[in-house]
Amino acid sequence: MKRITFIIFIVLGTIALKAQEADTSWKVNSDISLMMSQSSFSNWSAGGENSLTLNGYFNFYAGYLKGRVKWENMLALAYGQTKTGDFKFRKNEDKIDFASIYGLRTNDDSKWYYTAAFNFKSQFASGYDYPDGVDSTKVKISNFLAPAYTSIGLGMEYRPYDYMSFYISPITARWIIVNDQDLADAGAFGVEPAHIDATTGKKVHGEKVKFEFGAYFRFIFAKQLTKGIKFSTKLELYSNYLENPQNIDVNWDNMFDFTINSWLTANFGWQLVYDDDTPILLGDGTAGPRTQFRQVLGIGLAYKVSNRK
């Protein structure tokens, strides 16, 4: 199952590269980066714990633009682990994000497109909570395809510049997938939890899929600010018409990429998430949807490929 993402990448890459050989309307590029941070202490009077963090990032883009037709495909993968002191390695980064957007320009001179969009998000590996801070008490809270978010929508995109996009869809179907029966039974990520059938007295497993239908908005900005600095941001908002439409799901990704030379790079990023279907358990035992925040900083090696004709 975990090979699905790589199969998507290989298929898209092959199609795009083959098409580009015969059609200059294709633009294809990708970049890979490996980030590391490390600290070590020996007889250090101020104290401190040894730590090691490793992160890998892969981004792929294949875009087609000819006449009034535009088709863009974007794949972003990330995975990382960190080790602190005597603890085992723990996951600190995990992302699969694939989007395919097909647009038809409203007229030859317009910056508006009639648009159909597909999106898939998940992660590679299991995620754990450590209520007592130690490895022996870890509790699984996520897994591959648990959750996964798949959406299909129709809407309009406004593209004032190549590096800026506004997309609004009042008609978007979304499926929340929890392909882990233990998590599904617990009702994780908003799916229907397990229950005891009142007639038979038998346990009925939790549902693995929840369907939503609502409105979706996405803003993308990705621009080379200077020769060595690129900034990208993606803001996504979703309102489920079928349940609490006033509670807006938010996903906001931001990243600064610093190019030091052709091989050495650094990045600084942060992500803000609010999901009304994901309760967060606090130390006092209370749980509920809360604003989630994540920040990353790294330096490492990078390799970029661009096949633009």
Image (cartoon, grey):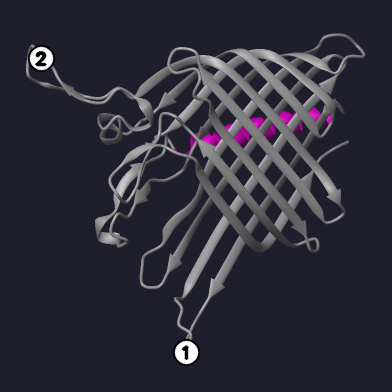
Residue for point 91% across, 11% down:
108
Residue ID for mark 2: 198
Q: Does residue 207 belong to the magenta stretch?
A: no
Residue for point 64% across, 19% down:
117
Q: Are marks 2 and 1 in contact (CB under 8 Å)?
A: no
Neighbourhood count class around disc 1 (C-alpha, 10 Å): few under 14, some 14–19, many 20 upward:
few
| In the image: residue 204, left or right of residue 261 | left
**Amino acid type of the residue tagged 2 in the rendering:** Ala
Name the quadrant containing residue 208.
top left
Residue for point 72% across, 33% down:
220
Q: Pick whichever, 273 or 36, lies toward us.
A: 273
**Amino acid type of the residue tagged 1 in the rendering:** Ser
Chain part drawn in magenta? 2-21
- Counting from the top left corner in percent of width and height, residue 139 is at 29, 49
Q: Which-is-in-front pick, marks 2 and 1?
A: 1
Name the residue at the top extreme.
Answer: 107
Q: CA distance from mark 2 to mark 1?
A: 64 Å
Residue ID for mark 1: 45
Q: Does residue 15 belong to the magenta stretch?
A: yes
Looking at the image, residue 162 lies above or below residue 199: below
